[in-house]
């Protein structure tokens, strides 16, 4: 009968046949970087729109909009209402504009970073990446 310690000792003495490969990343395809950054920007746009909607619903549920509306109505004699400027359609339109702007900016930023990396590789030699198989 062998103990658990003996079994662990036998396992530790056997060598694993893991192979290691080291590669240099010397080029990033420009259009692949643009497509990937566009997909990331689409995900960010969806998160932006959903978060604006949730924040508006929380603020409305807490009654903060109605309290600010009452305060401003008492200060300006009821000539305009705060809730006219901060309704759900206005909030979602603003969220859509922010999401579209983020979509453009993140896509262009991904293209610029890929271009800068491809230029910097000529000076630095690239990024060393190691892979192992288990």
Image (cartoon, rainbow, N blue to C red):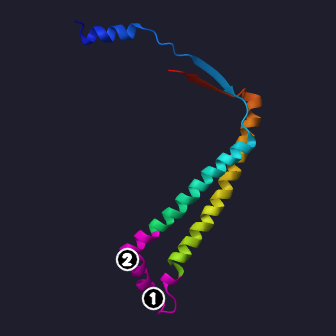
Which residue is located at x 64 percent, y 62 percent?
A: 100
Judged by its main secondary structure, the magenta piece is: helix
Q: Position of residue 87 (x, y in %)?
A: 50, 78
Which residue is located at x 72 percent, y 28 percent?
A: 124
Between tags 1 and 2, which lies in front? 2
Q: Position of residue 3 (x, y in %)?
A: 24, 9
Q: Which residues are magenta?
A: 56-84
Q: Looking at the picture, tell me which residue is in the foreground, 61 or 1.
A: 1
Sequence-first disc among 1 and 2: 2
In the displayed structure image, the side of residue 25 where residue 55 appears, left or right: left
> Compared with residue 42, is residue 130 higher up or lower down, i.e. above or below?
above
Quick one: SS at disc 2?
loop
Q: Looking at the picture, tell me which residue is in the foreground, 110 or 71.
A: 110
Quick one: SS at disc 1?
helix
Residue 73 sits in quarter: bottom left
For residue 73, which numbered disc appears in the image? 1
């Amino acid at each position: 009968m062998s103990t658990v310690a003996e079994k662990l000792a036998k396992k530790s003495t056997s060598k694993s046949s893991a192979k290691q490969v080291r590669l240099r990343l010397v080029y990033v395809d420009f259009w692949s970087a643009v497509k990937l950054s566009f997909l990331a920007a689409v995900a960010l746009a969806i998160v932006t729109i959903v978060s604006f909607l949730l924040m508006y619903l929380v603020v409305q549920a807490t009654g903060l909009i109605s309290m600010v509306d009452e305060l401003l109505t008492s200060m300006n004699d009821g000539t305009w209402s705060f809730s006219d400027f901060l309704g759900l359609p206005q909030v979602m339109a603003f969220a859509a504009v922010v999401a579209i702007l983020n979509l453009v900016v993140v896509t262009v930023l991904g293209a610029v970073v890929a271009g800068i990396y491809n230029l910097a590789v000529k000076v630095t030699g690239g990024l060393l990446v190691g892979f192992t198989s288990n």
